[in-house]
Amino acid sequence: MKKVLVTNDDGITARGLTTLVEKIGEKCEVYAVAPAEQQSAKGMAITFLREVSVEKTEVAGAAEAYIVDGTPVDCVKWALKYFRGRGVEFDYLFSGINLGANVGIAAYYSGTIGAAREGALNGVRSIALSVGTHESTHFDYIISLVPKLIEISDTLSPATLLSVNAPDLPPWKVRGLRFAEVAPFGYAEEYSFSPAGDNKGKTADELVWDGPLNFQLAQHSLDGKPSAGKSSEIGPGMLGRTGDPVTEADLKYDLDCMRYGFAAITPLSTGNSDDVALRKLQGRFSSDDVLAVFVDIQENAASGIEMRNRFAGNTARFASCVRRLDLPVYVTELAGGGKLMSEAADILSSDRTETSVRRELSAWGSGDFADMMAATSARRVLIAGLETHAAVLQTALDFVKKGYEVTVIEDCCASRNGHDHKMAIERLRDAGCTVTTSRAAVMELVSTTNHPAAEAVARIYKY
């Protein structure tokens, strides 16, 4: 039976935690360790200037439960050390269910997410759960996601935590589930100190400094209604678009998903280094960091592709840029698929090109391909080829499962059926792949590398 640690920032008696423990406890061995009192917005704060007390308690559905007189991160630190000392290793950590969404800038301050991040830092697959408002009553939908969330977490590195937000709505009113980015700082909301007490409503010029003044931190949403002292209150005002028409472009950020009545899953990293900036400052982009994989760009496969010449031209230009940037290239071919497309054959003929032949859909079905990947330290993969819904899709999904950062070059991928291509691209996005164009991918590489071939690459695309 899987062992699960459950914590939160709302306190051991919060209904979000007790409901979650009871439900997960039906199929897992659950241990609940949570703060003695409200710890919202504590982020990853820890207590080290005083002693922290721990008291045993009971929570329905939990094998054991403890109250910690400290922060959410204190709870996780204590629980991991204490239970490991007793031979208990946790398979998963759930933080929540938080009363109040943790979207946008709340991700920086949230104690719920802070606890999950602490778990991920310690190698435990961790998931933070948050629901709409501070008076939330609808937990059924987000709890129904738990099996799916575990499945998704298993495909990612334990160092990646999931932040999951759902609107405070009954399941039949939730419009769907999306993978989304954290809304950037300052997007549609802000935190600021406002005068409180007798000075409430006064401007800075109206304040009389004849002694200490009181201020209260408030979060202001796009609709202009502040939620004083509360973080990311996705209430009726912010759920006003649940019936509006919506496109995928409207659902880029977690905050927007919630506003339109969707739930959002956002993967968060535990790393602190900005790797792109680091490589830029170092003035280089190591060829060991990234490689290009071309899948089935063979004449037989390309012959039935609509707008074949356009696909071939895009692929040839992309291959030329890859060569100019001196990136390693892996070409995987389907047995019996014929020769490489004439437009790309000469470009990809180099001692930096490795080739494997297979009979399975995924490139990983070839032992030679697996051996080639084992010989490289690259963790970022650029994928182009045919057909998007078949070999490209299966190869990319296998890369994701193995922990690689996958970028799919959309205009260098194609299927005989345009609908198949479109649906496969959506599936790839949902799986966590970055989908971009060949120009955008190449210019990103060039702009972060100070590469001596930058001018030559620019000429290929006539920038």
Image (tube, grey):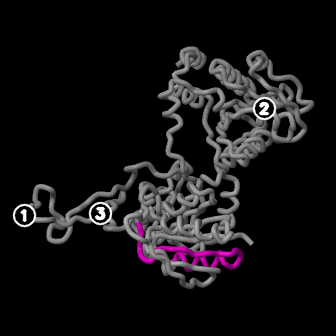
> How far separated are the C-alphas under marks 3 and 1?
22 Å
Q: Residue 35, image x and y in percent?
A: 47, 74
Per the image, is 27 magenta?
yes
The numbered mark, 3 or 1, whose residue comes first in the sequence reads 1
Amino acid type at circle 1 is Asp
Q: Amino acid at mark 2?
A: Ile
Query: Picture quarter containing residue 348?
Result: top right
| Residue in the image at 14% along x and 65% along y | 212
SS category of the residue bearing label 3:
strand
Quick one: SS at disc 2?
loop
| Residue range of the region highlighted in magenta in the rendering | 16-40
Q: Where does label 3 land, which residue? A: 217
Tag 1 residue: 210
Q: Would you place residue 329 above or below residue 225 in this image?
A: above
Question: Do the residues bearing badges 2 and 1 touch, measured as CB atoms within 8 Å?
Answer: no
Residue at 54%, 78% (x, y): give it: 66
Q: Give coordinates of residue 373: x percent, y percent.
A: 77, 35
